[in-house]
Image (cartoon, rainbow, N blue to C red):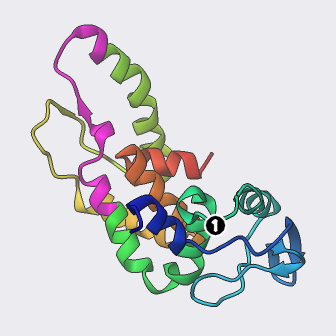
Amino acid sequence: MLTRGKAQSAERPRRFYAAADPGALEDGFGVLLDGRPVRTPGGTRMILPTLGLAQLVAAEWAAQGERIVISDMPATRLAYTAIDRAADARDAVAGEIADKAGADVLCYFAEAPDSLVERQVADWGPILDWAAGDLDLQFVRVTGLIHQPQPEATLARLRSLALELTDFELTGLINAAGLYGSAILAFALQRG
């Protein structure tokens, strides 16, 4: 009888390559496993937009042991998602980002203590001001935890900005928004 851990290990594919290296491909960059380009679960050749991303993904593949553990490869999983799924789900993903912005954590300021309020104003205020100035996103700031709907024009503008991104950028944006609880912070990260 197999234990749960051994059963999971047996389900994971064995490592079938000796070397994982980043490399130039015809339309971008990729990861070469013993000189052969990686393909996504959907069967598409993994073409990455930057050498830096190819280096990161190659490092994840190189770090694998006897079995390939995809859950230990976040950049690879994001690349798979961007390549295999993002193109068909762009509108839905942009809608999810707008939904997150509708209850963005940066818009909810504490009532007390004063030291927390001051820190939030000092740290979050400039980011909200940046979003208003650079992205033309006017968010309603709230004191307390009672939900305040954001203006539909702001959410529509945010959806539009999301749809301007490449599939890779959009995939990164939705993941960052979920991680931070903030579409505003995700856009700040995406915009540098």
The image quadrant of residue 152 is: bottom left
The image quadrant of residue 108 is: top left
Residue 118 lies in the magenta stretch: no
At which x and y percent is residue 128?
Answer: 40, 38
Residue 131 horizontal side relative to residue 151, left or right: right
Question: Which type of secondary structure does the marked residue at label 1 adopt?
Answer: loop
Q: In which quarter of the image is the N terminus?
A: bottom left
Q: Which amino acid does label 1 sit on?
A: Ile
Residue 77 horizontal side relative to residue 8, left or right: right
At which x and y percent is residue 94?
Answer: 39, 70
Residue 45 horizontal side relative to residue 86, left or right: right
Q: In which quarter of the image is the C terminus?
A: top right
Residue 101 lies in the magenta stretch: yes
At which x and y percent is residue 85?
Answer: 49, 81
The residue lying furthest to the left in this view is: 146
Which residue matches tag 1?
68
The residue lying furthest to the front in this view is: 1
At which x and y percent is residue 113?
Answer: 21, 11
Residue sitting at x 22%, y 52%: 150
| Start-end of magenta stretch | 98-117
Total marks in image: 1
**In front here: 29 or 96?**
29
- At label 1, counting other C-alpha atoms closer than 10 Å, the crowd grade (few under 14, some 14-19, many 20 or more) is some
**In front here: 188 or 138?**
188
Residue sitting at x 57%, y 56%: 72
Residue 111 horizontal side relative to residue 176, left or right: left
Q: In the figure, 167 relative to 141: above or below? A: below
Residue sitting at x 86%, y 66%: 19
Q: Can residue 25 be seen in this view?
A: yes
Q: Is residue 166 visible?
A: no
Q: In the figure, 28 relative to 125: above or below? A: below
